[in-house]
Amino acid sequence: MIFKTLLFTGLLALSASALEEGFTALFNGSNLDGWTRVNGSGEYSVVDGEIVGSGEKVANNTFLRTTKTYGNFDFRFEIKFDDLTGNSGMMFRGLQKPGEDGRVFGYQCEHDNRKDRAWTAGLYDEARRGWLVPAAGDAKAEKAFTQQGKKIFKWTDWNEIRIVCQDRHLQIWLNDELRVDYTDEGDDFTPEGFFALQVHAGDSCHVRWRNLRIKEL
């Protein structure tokens, strides 16, 4: 799977099942125990062992966040848009401002529903610095990121995403291809936080996730 290239070169002689050793499920497949909905009016439900995020006329970005926080990890999951009416994302090492329903902010793995941009598995700093990968305003990087995304993102099928965090080093893969290799040297570096699924504000959003599993490093 993720290490396909290494397997072919003989540098890592592990089977696909061996690569999953040490992982635990982040979602139990039957209910949302261990998760809490915060912020906007989007909704989350469990259907056929999948988490479904949806909403119509969503006033604010809505998040389904884990109650537990994580620091260094190898996190894997699948995402699929039911339609392309609304943007989404997966927060990692997420944070929340003070208050009963404080604003979620921090690192986000983008789920992009725009075919003209195709930035799924890009690195966005939600409610903070904006785009980190591709770097905001870097036209060359943005074009190359779009070209790669158009080739590898499955618009009507499931997509495998992998996020690895080792201290300041953040990496994201989409369908076995590296999309983000970023070292956060900024003052806003976040060493630990929660995961959170996003239903983006807007007219409509229909997205789902499955096979969420993590290995803490």
Image: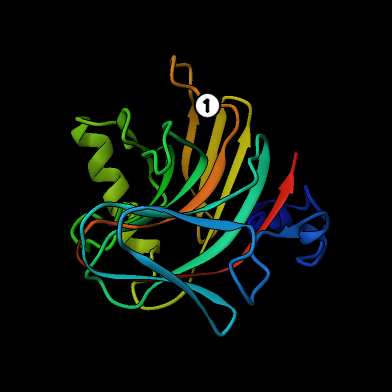
From the top left corner, tell me how far across and down residue 108 is, in percent.
Answer: 42, 43
Horizontal and vertical percent position of residue 180:
46, 40
- Quarter of the image with the N terminus in it: bottom right
Identify residue type, mark 1: Thr
Q: Within the image, what quadrant is residue 26 found in?
A: bottom right
In which quadrant is the C terminus drawn?
top right
Direction from residue 170 to residue 26 in the image, left or right: right
Image: 164 above or below 49: above
Residue marked by disc 1 = 190
Residue found at the far front of this picture? 100
Camera-side residue of 53 and 212: 53
Q: Nearer the viewer, residue 199 or 161?
A: 199
Figure quadrant of residue 187: top left
Q: Is residue 185 above or below residue 17?
A: above
Disc 1 is placed on an element classified as loop
- Give the quarter of the image for residue 81: bottom left
Residue drawn at x 54%, y 48% is: 195
Closer to the camera, 11 or 159? 159
Q: Is residue 124 left or right of residue 13?
A: left
The residue lying at 28 percent from left, 36 percent from top is 141
Q: Is 100 displayed left or right of 59 in the figure?
A: right
Please state which of residues 194 and 87 is positioned toward the viewer in this rendering. Answer: 194
